[in-house]
Image (cartoon, rainbow, N blue to C red):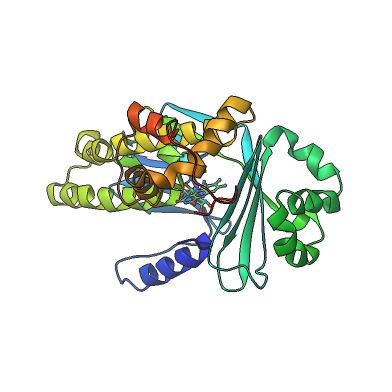
Amino acid sequence: MILLPKVAQDLLLKKIAQRSNVSLFWGTTFQGFVYEGTKRTGVEVDWNGEKTTLRAPVIVGGDGVRSAIRTALQIEHRLHQYKDGYLTMVVDRPPGFEGETRYYLGRREIFGAFPVSKEKIYLFYMVPSGCLERLREGSFEQFKEKILSFHPATRSVLDAPLKAVSSWKETSYMPCFRVRCRRWVTDGAALIGDAAHAMNPHVAQGRNTAMEDGIVLAEVLEECFRKGDFSAEALSHYESRRRPSIEALQRLGDELTWLWNSGFPPVTWARDRIFRSIHCKRDLHDKILMTIAGLKESPFHLTDRWRALHLWGGLPDGPRENRT
Ligand SMILES: Cc1cc2nc3c(=O)[nH]c(=O)nc-3n(C[C@H](O)[C@H](O)[C@H](O)COP(=O)(O)OP(=O)(O)OC[C@H]3O[C@@H](n4cnc5c(N)ncnc54)[C@H](O)[C@@H]3O)c2cc1C
């Protein structure tokens, strides 16, 4: 299932706003913590230009990759920016672009087109962040031509929708990050989502894991409220339940980045071979699908990687184009 994040987010926010025990403060920016003695008792925020204090026994930082709450909590962390990010745009969905996604991998090149609604498709093109300035200084028409000539099938499908976009302003650049924190909880505070553990988007689990964090943290907090104990130790049940699967996904994200984004011929050979034959090994196919769909996480062993290469037996017949 692919959709623009805002669609799901708006639905969830609408539901949340209907709850009588939830207050939403739109337009607030975190400024710092409020203390009573040495005890952290709330946050100071800028609320549409006004300084406001919000008090709470526990503070949850879900403020993304560059989390200001994480910095204020002085949580030791490593923020890694991957070499490659994605230039993206949303264009009209052309006739004939049915339900399937199109995902093309070349040498150091990735281009994809995903249907996100009945009317729109989402395009993404891999661009190393170091090359973005140079690309944007060049002609937008040349860039469109690059997309159209990516694969024989792209021109016929994307010619019309790309004619309707005319400038770089209609594109966005999405850099990719990984965040590793020494800890996700401290006395009276916890981090969730990208603030705690951003991962490469090849695993397509950033938002999903952020929501999963919320579910687990809510269960742990219920116990904390019952006991009136918001210490790091009490909150650590949340971290210990979530960390192993998050670390496995981060490792998988890095492995997929190495394999998919590569320009090194032996690696691209292996990658193409895996893509063309993975559906022959149904169990392996389902394992990776379940992981990337966020349904079930299973560890990938050396034998899985070896089997994925499909070194014995010919490759399945059919066009080079693979559909997933
Ligand atoms: C190219 C790309 C493709 C992706 N594809 C997928 C995918 O297919 N599936 C998937 O699950 N994930 C995907 N992700 C990852 C996903 O976008 C993130 O993991 C997800 O958005 C993290 O959610 P979050 O709520 O933790 O952080 P964010 O979405 O970054 O939200 C943080 C919020 O905090 C607010 N904020 C920041 N600082 C402050 C402050 N000082 N005060 C107040 N508020 C503040 C921000 O305004 C923002 O609203 C992708 C990411 C990239 C880059």
Q: Is residue 177 visible?
A: no
Q: What residue lies at 68% left-to-right and 70% top-to-bottom? A: 94
Judge by depth and name the residue closer to the eye, 254 or 8: 254
Quadrant hosting residue 305? top left
Q: What residue lies at 22% left-to-right and 49% top-to-bottom? A: 221
Which quadrant would the N terminus be assigned to in this image? bottom left
- Give the image location of residue 29, x and y in percent: 52, 51
Q: Is residue 245 visible?
A: yes
Query: As drawn, is 175 to the left or to the right of 72?
Result: right
- Give the image location of residue 257, x and y in percent: 53, 35
Please identify the residue farthest to the left as the structure is shown: 227
- Give the image location of residue 107, x and y in percent: 66, 35
Q: What residue lies at 34% left-to-right and 65% top-to-bottom? A: 22
Looking at the image, residue 41 lies above or below residue 262: below
Judge by depth and name the residue closer to the eye, 243 or 259: 259
Q: What residue lies at 63% left-to-right and 27% top-to-bottom? A: 265
Looking at the image, residue 141 lies above or below residue 241: below
- Give the image location of residue 27, x and y in percent: 53, 59
Query: As drawn, is 273 to the left or to the right of 182?
Result: right
